[in-house]
Image (spheres, rainbow, N blue to C red):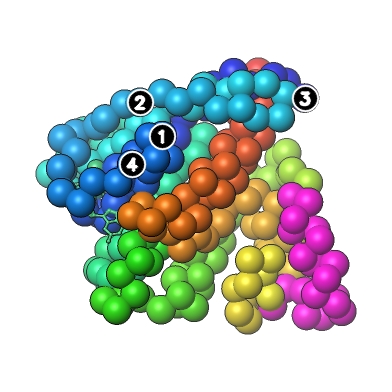
């Protein structure tokens, strides 16, 4: 496979959902309670060890406020991966996920860009307004929308964990109804769901405050982003 030396990761989602805190947690293992809004875009670099060598991860952390719509428009192009974040205590931020995907599409995000949909602030369980099951269903819809945007000219093999999960689920007739990461009763035809799992959009319940699932979410996203970049480099 072509060696990937750098990937571009962007953050998407309404203001205050915790995009900057997730990145800070991953890069610096820190959490700050005080809200410091991102002004426009913040840029950061983190070298990350990956199979095959070190990869330079370029983070473009976008401000979520609607007043930054025009500023954000330039940063979708050439991204391989996106954190698509909502606050599990803020239903409106959840309901705007589809609008964020549409913004990405209309501003030139690559159709195959990988999404890690994050339901953030799970530490605040008592204030939770979006049940996990509902969030997982919506994330699956994001996946499906993304798959429909793609021309499957270079379909990728299923991720190994997806294959294991599909095998473990038993008879073929049930396979499209339960996703590898536990989506219930996904109303997808097998071909679409197989392709969706193969391209690797995922849902994670995260907390930038206590660190839950932050590392695994970024690692999975980087792996998918590296595959996408390698495919793009191979195709010239
Ligand atoms: N309880 C809790 N609070 C969080 C968590 N993540 C972020 N916050 C708080 O939520 C507020 C907003 O966090 P940010 O990371 O600045 O949000 P953002 O999405 O980057 O916001 P913009 O830059 O305005 O788009 C801050 O007060 C954080 O301390 C979390 O996992 N749990
Ligand atoms: Mg921010």
In the rendering, which numbered label is found on residue 30? 4
* Of pointers 4 and 3, the one earlier in the residue sequence: 3
Question: Can you give x and y, in whole percent of width and height, for residue 166 in the image?
Answer: 79, 67
Which quadrant holds residue 193? bottom right
Label placed on residue 1: 3
Q: Cβ–Cβ below 8 Å for labels 1 and 2?
A: yes
Position of 163 relative to 78 (above/below)? below
At mark 3, the secondary structure is loop
Query: Which residue is rendered at x = 56% and y = 37% of the image?
Result: 222
Question: How much space separates mark 2 and mark 4, taking CA atoms?
Answer: 15 Å
Looking at mark 3, is its residue's CB closer than 8 Å to ligand 1?
no
- Name the side, left or right, on which 177 lies relative to 136: right
Q: Earlier in the sequence, mark 2 or mark 3?
A: 3
At a point 56% along the width and 56% down the height, the residue shown is 202
Q: Depth check: 173 or 211 in front? A: 211
Residue 235 position within the rendered picture, expressed as x and y whole percent measured from the top left: 69, 23
Magenta stretch: includes residue 203: no
**How busy is the neighbourhood of tag 1: few (under 14 within 10 Å), some, or many (20 plus)?**
some
Distance in Å between CA atoms under marks 2 and 3: 27 Å
Q: In this view, does 78 lie to the left or right of 14?
A: right
Disc with the residue nearer the chain's start (1 vs 2):
1
State the residue position of label 1.
Answer: 27
Q: Which image quadrant for residue 183? A: bottom right
Percent coordinates x, y for residue 158 in the rendering:
76, 51
The residue nearer to you, when weighing 27 against 11, is 27
- Residue 30, compared with residue 235, is above or below; it is below
Using the image as rendered, state which of residue 16 and residue 65 is in the foreground.
16
- Element at label 2: strand
CA distance for labels 1 and 2: 9 Å
Q: Point out the frontmost of discs 1 and 2.
A: 1
């Amino acid at each position: 496979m072509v060696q990937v030396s750098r990937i571009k990761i962007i953050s998407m989602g309404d203001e205050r959902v915790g995009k900057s805190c997730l990145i800070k947690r991953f890069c610096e293992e820190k959490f700050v309670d005080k809200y410091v809004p991102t002004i426009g875009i913040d840029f950061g670099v983190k070298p990350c060890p990956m199979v095959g060598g070190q990869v330079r991860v370029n983070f473009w952390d976008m401000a979520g406020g609607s007043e930054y719509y025009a500023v954000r428009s330039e940063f979708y192009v050439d991204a391989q991966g996106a954190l698509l974040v909502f606050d599990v205590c803020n239903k409106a931020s959840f309901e705007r996920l589809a609008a964020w995907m549409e913004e990405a599409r209309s501003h030139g995000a690559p159709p195959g860009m990988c999404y890690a949909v994050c339901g953030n602030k799970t530490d605040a369980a008592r204030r939770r307004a979006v049940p996990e099951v509902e969030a997982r269903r919506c994330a699956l819809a994001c996946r499906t929308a993304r798959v429909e945007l793609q021309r499957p000219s270079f379909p990728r093999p299923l991720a190994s964990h997806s294959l294991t999960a599909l095998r473990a689920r038993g008879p073929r007739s049930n396979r499209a109804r339960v996703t590898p990461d536990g989506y219930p009763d996904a109303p997808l035809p097998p071909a679409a769901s197989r392709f969706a799992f193969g391209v690797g959009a995922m849902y994670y319940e995260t907390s930038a405050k206590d660190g839950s699932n932050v590392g695994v979410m970024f690692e999975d996203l980087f792996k998918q982003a590296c595959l996408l970049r390698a495919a793009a480099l191979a195709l010239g």
